[in-house]
Image: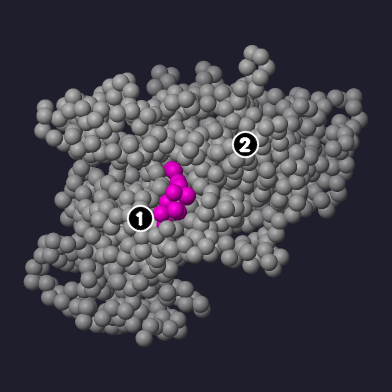
Amino acid sequence: MPLSTEQLNEIAAHLAKRPGHTAVTSTLARLLTEGLGARPADIDFEKPLPEVHGRLDALLGRTVFEVKSDLRKELPDAREQLASYLQGREAATGERYLGIATDGATFIAFHLDGGALQELQRHTTKIDEEGNGAHALLDWLSAAVVLETELAPEPEKVKEELGKSSLAFMVARSRLKKLWEELKSDPEVAVKRELWERHLALVYGQRVNDDELFFQHTYLTIVAKTMATNVLGVPPPAAEDLLSGKVFEQSGISGAVESDFFDWLLAGKDGADAVSRVVSQTSRFRLREVKSDILKGLYESLVDPGQRHVLGEYYTPDWLAARVCREAITDPLNQRVLDPACGSGTFLFHALQRFFDAADAAGWPAAKAITAACNKVLGIDIHPVAVIIARVTYLLAMGDRLKKSRPFSIPVYMGDALQWNTEGMLGGRDVAIETPGGPTLRFPFSITSDPQVFDNVIHRMLALSEQPQPDAGPAVFEGWLTAHHKGLGRGDVGELSRTYDALRSLRKQRRDHIWGFVARNLTRPVGLSVPEQRPDVVVGNPPWLSYRYMSKEMQERFRDECLKRNLWTGGKVATHQDMSGYFFVRCAELYLRGDGLMAFVMPYASLDRKQFAGFRSGMYGKKNGNGVENGVATLTFTGAWLFDENVQPLFPVPSCVLFARPVKGGESAGVRPDFVHSWSGVLPERNAVAAVVDKLEAEGRFARRSVRWPPEASDDEASTYRDRFRQGATVVPRMLFLVERVRVSSLLPGAVGMPLVRSRKNNQEKEPWRSLDPVQDNVEEEFVWTLYLGESVGPYRLFEAAEAVIPWSEQANKMLDAKGAYGAGLSYLPQWMTKVEQIWEKHKKSPMSLTERLDYHAGLAVQFPIPAIRVVFAASGTLPAAALLKDRRAVVEHKLYWASVRTLAEGRYLCAVLNSETARSRIEHQQSRGQWGARDFDKLMLGLPIPAFDRGEALHNDLAALAERAERVAAVALKEGEHFVTARRRIREALTADGVAAEVDRLVGQLLGPA
């Protein structure tokens, strides 16, 4: 009988007291049997180990338990014994084991890595009234001993058991790391890794060389392929057959699982065993009960979590994907649907659900429904792991129908939906695939446009390339090609012959096995863009990759592509442009039928911001010499759903859904509705299922109302001050610059003129910087500057600033790197710069040097010589914050904007305007919006018609006087360590209570004129 919450609480409370070896052992036995369902006969207590002349405290499956009375004192002994037991067990059985040391209050998991014991994870026994702590212990043990208990297929449960913080992942990661060290010089493994990096370059905009990410992707692939196999209802096969998808091939299902980049570990001696451990962990879920995209949470946990904000990857919750599909797919049985950026397959899942519901209503048998579905609902993604997961999601959506229909092929492809790997434009797109350090494989449009023909040709190429040389040379392949594909032109036959010869060359180098997989997938988007294959509905959530995060090469390509389509704004908003608008247009251009519909989740900025002006025009091309529109696509917008901060939780930034269709005869491009739907409401969780949201809407707790399309932002009346304000220096990563002074002892002060300083770190620092050891050394006093951060400024007042090592030489009027510091004859700065530059070069994601990064866009150099009086204001925040800065030994970071002013009166005049609610409210509609509302100010308020300060203007002088009064009011007492958000709020409350805030707002309204 399972343990009740009350019983679990009693057990947890008992264990938390460290009751001693015997009591912990007996209580552990109860947890394993009554809590996890293990049979008593399966647990060996005091098991003798002849190989090490000792006894195990407990053994269950491949998990060894070592029980102690108090690990705080006995941990070294526990480690020594576990190391001995694990080595003995693994030597005797040839299998890998997990070790757990516990005293009841603490559980510590270990495994052997290279013969040495390595700690993986700790769990502390906790109790609370709801029993959550006790259940957490049971869950932790369940993951450790890998019992066959079935688990509910809920997204959070999948993430908990298999995600990045799970014991399963930690064990797998350690083993993958060891396998990589063994295999990384193998030619075939190396080419798979290289191709993986190239694909991610299209995802990220730049190359990613990250071992940890490669291990995460490999692990997630094993999980996904195990789940796919479990969906079939067959036991997991051997590791090689699992990763190659042999069981699917035998079952008549193609396109679901195939050999790819991530089977590299099988070349290692322990590769198959590493796979089997992950398979055991994954096989516990009851996948027949799936009702949503259960892999989304796992995907978000493991697929590049540190990169998603940079990339603009914000995965769509199930309820929103279901709503979009419901709105866009009006005739499921007859409309062809494509998601060209399908990610984990959320839109595919709900498009399939819509299709199968209609098929069931029409009385279609399962075989007919599945065959039709695979022709009607299709997906593409460039991310290799996303594609594997999306294929599993596709299978899950089929449910029990899988048992009643074979053969079929899953239409989800690892391809470049933008078709940047094709040569030529719409008239004929030959696919070109570059091989790392080798020839380019070219496939003419005549075969890529027909998937069946292409599969036949590539299969023959690979089969012949495996024949003994020189028996199967190019002449043999040409003979087969002309006999079986008589319609091919001579030029195409020659091109394919050269590609075949290149494959033979790769075969000799042991670098050919992956190319069939790569070629088949990368050519599929071309076939889908052939007019007769185009979908009726294109749905999804495109990448929001920002221009500033693209590599230089990708920036150039992106800019050229946008210029061709009237999408490039450039100028001051160039760095704000992102991939989403171009992706939208390119997909309409390549895939959408003339009577089709687009429905994409887009940034809120696409509705009104300047960088999306060309996108909103609907005319994607240029006028030719005769004045005739020469566009590659024309669209009209048919609707929009707005999701700003009034919907929580959703995305980290505000978003919308845009609906559009091709322009019909006699219509104008870019037409959009006067009114759109704005949504509001609080959801129980971000990924709430559609049924929950439908219920909330029925109850009136989640609603949409009709509002006007947001007005377009304009800077036509930019203030004279706009160009005088500059953004501060990019002091990133902070831990390489921000410092705190170190006292050698309580009796000795720091050295005069050369203080000992250490890196100052905080929780906001991103990885890997947050986890790095601090730098500590002496530095000349002249290079330790006061640094004002975004959080250092409140309304009319400065807060405590930081100190930073800024290698700017006032004497030489330039930045000094380590080499320059040595050349300047300095004693201490050179060694500091050497250390931080080495750290930067090891971990950087940018091609810039550290000093180039610090002075990005001259953000530092332009601050020198430092003016006597500056106005500084925060670049972001819910409400504005501006103050005067009169420190000539202070520099400003990029979260602040600054401008020098001639007099205190002018500075106070500007502070009054920039701190006013009047100015803020007038630019609110132009702000980007975060989870808690409008957040970025940048130079928006400087776009208001703020006149230059004039001593002769009474209104200007009155505002300066009010600002001086506000400075006195703002000097409220603050608590030590008080958070800057709280401090800002208290200052605003004081300003409101005094009445000065209202007076400033009234005068600023007079200054700016009617809104």
Query: Quick one: 124 or 694, which is closer to the camera?
Result: 694
* Residue 749 % position (x, y): 48, 42
Asked if the residues shown at circle 2 and circle 1 are in contact, with their CB atoms under 8 angstroms apart, the answer is: no
Q: Give the residue displayed 44% in from the left and 73% down from the top.
A: 133
Mark sitting earlier along the chain (2/1): 1
Q: Give the residue displayed 71% in from the left and 31% down from the top.
A: 666
Q: Is residue 735 magenta?
A: no
- Looking at the rendered structure, the secondary structure element under dot 2 is strand
Query: Quick one: 569 or 538, which is closer to the camera?
Result: 538
Q: Amino acid at mark 2?
A: Pro
Q: Quadrant of residue 510?
A: top left
Please state if 935 lies on the left or on the right of 730 as rendered: right
Q: Amino acid at mark 1?
A: Ala
- Which residue has dot 1 on it? 224
How many other residues sit within 10 Å of disc 2, few (<14), some (14-19) or many (≥20)?
A: many
Q: Give the residue displayed 39% in from the left and 42% down from the top.
A: 414
How many other residues sit within 10 Å of disc 1, few (<14), some (14-19) or many (≥20)?
A: many
* Residue 89 % position (x, y): 15, 66
Q: Quadrant of residue 489?
A: top left
Please state if 168 lies on the left or on the right of 155 as rendered: left
- Which residue has dot 2 on it? 662
Q: Is residue 375 magenta?
A: yes
The stretch in magenta equals 370-381
Query: Quick one: 728 or 624, which is closer to the camera?
Result: 624
- Looking at the rendered structure, the secondary structure element under dot 1 is helix
Q: Quadrant of the C terminus?
A: top right
Q: Is residue 500 visible?
A: no
Dot in front, 2 or 1: 2
